[in-house]
Image: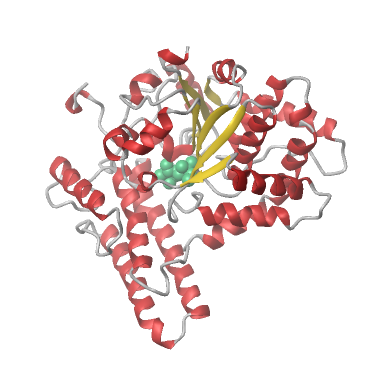
Amino acid sequence: MTESTLPPQLDFSKPGSFPYETLRTRMPVILTKAIDSLHQHISDNVEDEGRSEAMASIGRLTKLKYEMQTGKVMRKLDDDGDDVDVWHETLDRMAAQHSEDAKWWKLPWLFSECYMYRRIREATLLSRMLRDVDPFWGSKTSSYHCSETRIGELAAFVHGTACRMDNNEKAFEILLQFSLWGNKSDLSLMADFDGSESLDHMQASTEAHLQELKQHILCDDTAMLWERVSSFKNACVHIVLDNAGIELFSDLCFAHWLVHTNHAKTVVFHGKAYPWFVSDVTRRDLDWMLDQLSETEDSDARAHLAALWKQHFAEGVFVYQSDPFWTYPHEFERMPESAPDLYKTLASADLIMFKGDLNYRKLVADRMWPADTPFEKALGPFTPAMLVALRTLKSDTLAGVPLARVKQAEENDPAWNVNGTTAVIQCFRPAAAQ
Ligand SMILES: O=P(O)(O)OC[C@H]1O[C@](O)(CO)[C@@H](O)[C@@H]1O
Ligand SMILES: [Mn+2]
C-alpha cells in the first residue's frame, strides 16, 4: 500500500473526538502538573544563583502550554540533545505532509503528543538545576504506593506458587493476564483477597476474576503464544516496557516465570531514556522499585524477589536497555531505517512483547484502520520476529477485531476503546517461526 491508499493517522480535525479532547483538556493538565512539580522542586532545592535559570525553564513550559492552546507553531528544539536532528527532520516532514507552518492542531496526534514530552525534556535539559529532575516522579512513586497491597499479593503468588504449579500453562496464563491488566492503571485483580486466606484460595479467587475479565479481551491469541512459549528452552525474550509501578512489577513477574521454568535464559527489558508519557519506565524507576521491594521484611516474598531480580540484572539474566528510538515520535515501521541496530537486536529475539497503548499505536502507525483489518496488515513492514502486543485500549486505533465484537463492546460501554476496560492480546508469527 502506498501512503495515499493507507487510512489516515488519528488527528485533531474532529471536535469532540478523543484526540481532540486530549489536546484540548488532558495535555494542558499534564503540562500544568509537570510545571507544578518542577516549581516545587525549585522551591525546595534550588538556591539563589540557580533559581533564575531554573525559572526560565518553567517559563518555557508555560509558553508551551500557551502555544498548544492557541494553535501556535511547533518550533524546533533549542537544546543540544543527540536526538535533535531526528526531531527536526520529522518536524519538517510532518509540516510538508500536513501543514506548511507546522501549527499545533494541524499535525497528527501521535507526533504532537510525543513532541510535547520532548519539549518538557528540552526545558529540563536547558537548566543545570533541572536536567536530572523527573517532573513525573511524584505521581509514579505515589501510584506505586497505592498498589503495594496488590503487589504484595502478586509477589506471594509468584514466589510461592507460580513456578511450582503442576500446570505450567495455567501459571503462564495467569501471569500473562496480570501483565496485560497491569496496563490498566487501576488493577482490580485479587479484589477478594484480604491477606488472611491461603495461597490456594487466593489463586482460586484470582482465577475466577481473570476468567470474568476474559470477556473484555476483544482478540485473545494466548493459545498461539503458549504454543510458541511452551516450546522454548533457554530462549531470549524481549519486553518493550510501558508503565512503572504495578505494570512493571507484573512484567518482571512474567519474566521471572519465564526464567525460573527455564523457558528463557535471558529477558531484555526496553525502557525509556527519559521521563515520557507521565508513567513510562526509566532506569531510575526500575531501580527505585527494586529498592522499595527490598525494604520489606526479610520473610516477605517481595524482598526475596527483589534480591533475586537484582542478582539477575547483575548477572545479565535480566538486561535493561533504553534505546533513543523509544522516545522518537516514530511509528515502529521506521525502525529498520532509523535505528538499524535496535531492529537487528529485536530480530534476534525468540519473542518480543510490546506493552501498552502507546506501543500499540506505534506498531499499527496510529492509523484509523477498519477494526477488522488483519493485525499483520496493520503492522505493515514491521515484522522483526514473533511478537505479541498486550494492550488495554486507551485510544481509538485498533486492528484484528471482528466488527460484531466491536459493536458489542460499544453497546456495553460507549467509552470502551479509551478507558482501559477492554484489551487485546495479539500475536504476529513470521513464517520462519511456525
Ligand atoms: O501507558 P499507555 O498504555 O501507553 O497509555 C498511554 C496512552 O494514553 C493516552 O495518553 C490516551 O489516554 C494515549 O495518548 C497513550 O496512547
Ligand atoms: Mn505509558
**Residue 132 in the image: x percent, y percent?**
45, 66
Residue in the image at 42% along x and 14% along y: 432
Q: Which quadrant holds the N terminus?
A: top left
**Residue 55 in the image: x percent, y percent?**
37, 77
Q: Nearer the viewer, residue 381 or 339?
A: 339
Left or right: residue 193 compared with residue 82: right
Left or right: residue 324 compared with residue 255: left
Residue in the image at 35% along x and 40% along y: 17
Residue in the image at 84% along x and 49% along y: 299
Q: Is residue 65 visible?
A: yes
Location of ligand 1 given as a quarter of the image:
top left
Q: Residue lying furthest front in this view?
A: 315
Its colouring scheme is secondary structure
Q: Can you say whether 59 is above or below 204 in the image?
A: below
Q: Residue lying furthest bottom in this view?
A: 48
**Residue 160 in the image: x percent, y percent?**
80, 36
What is the quadrant of residue 384 in the picture?
top left
Q: Nearer the viewer, residue 383 or 39?
A: 383
How many numbered marks have been drawn onto this rendered protein structure? Answer: 0
What is the quadrant of residue 97 in the picture?
top left
Left or right: residue 171 compared with residue 267: right
Residue in the image at 31% along x and 32% along y: 333
Left or right: residue 311 compared with residue 14: right
Q: Is residue 106 visible?
A: no
